[in-house]
Image: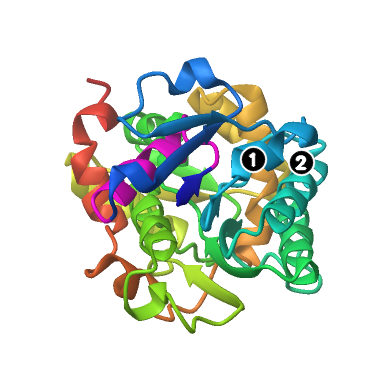
Amino acid sequence: MFAITGASGRLGRLALAALLERVDPAEVVALSRTPRAAADLPHVRRRAADFADPSALPAAFDGVRRLLLVSTDRTPGRLALHRAAVAAAAAAGVEHVVYTSVVRAAEAGNPVPEARDHGLTEALLTDSGLAHTVLRVNVWPEMLLLSGLARLAVAAGELPSGAGAGRVGYVTRPDTARAAAALLAGDGGLAGGRGEPPGRVLDLTGPGLTDAEVAAALAGATGRPVRHRPVADEEVAGALTALGVPTALAAAWGENDPFRRAGWFDVPDGGAARALLGREPVGLAEFFAAHRRELLGG
């Protein structure tokens, strides 16, 4: 059987839909810590799986051959939750785990706060003896929409940041889901199957873009002038707040500017996205064009 954790979440739902295009629904288990939220999922088996309740996980993973472990966003305490899930998967005899991580997660000296738990989870998988594939995902452009930053930048005609010439290889959430589903299904190419490496790491990334190129993509998609305005690190949060970005989001986004400037999100494209998707990943210009109405405030 194939199973997906967090199946009622944004990424999990998309991965489940993509998986059902590849395998028999009778062989799919949707795992969620909130079973009520999974009530509207397609006609697949549904099981409760709360990483905070390790005693219930063996039953959730029973009979699962290949598992997509969608990283939880609950912090602090995320590493403990992942440790419980990995231990339960090993105890249940899961044959292969696909884990959604972030780029450069295990790289020495990585200062990105988000990377720490992911790097340590990767180590847990290695130490567990489980055959696994780590899908290290770059930044979702959806975050530019959810934060309101992209729409507000279009309205103001400027995108302020301190990222300088730092590049980010944006890759969309739907493409992430489809790539993860391909790995889970064990379809050919990089997706592997029998004989796949026991501890493989793949980078899922798009072409690296600077914030000046992001601003240009916003302008191209909306027909409105948008320029990149460089600001000092200590001024980024204030500049974003002035645009209308909520204070907490502005602070969090600004904290990443030095990391982007230093190249921590600029990852060489090894071709994993093309191999797993069977096409080029959706680029930022195409993504913005698909959301033109939202960017214009419609």
Residue 248 is drawn in which quadrant? top right
- At x 66%, y 50%, the residue is 256
Local crowd at mark 1 within 10 Å, few (<14), some, or many (≥20)? some
Q: Is residue 236 visible?
A: no
Give how far apart the Cα atoms at labels 2 and 1 are: 8 Å
Q: Which residue is mark 1?
A: 72
Q: Which residue is mark 2?
A: 81
Q: Which amino acid, mark 2? A: Leu
The residue mark sitting in front, 2 or 1, is 2
Pointer 2 with pointer 1, Cβ within 8 A: yes
Residue 127, position as x, y percentages in the image: 80, 69
Q: Which amino acid, mark 1? A: Thr
The reply to whether the magenta stretch includes residue 17 is: yes
285 left or right of 71 in image: left
The colouring scheme, among rainbow, by chain, secondary structure or one colour, is rainbow
- Which of the two residues, 170 or 220, is positioned nearer the viewer here? 170
**Image quadrant in which the C terminus is located:** top left
Label 2 sits on a secondary structure element that is helix
Q: Is residue 133 above or below residue 142?
A: below
Magenta stretch, residue numbers: 5-22
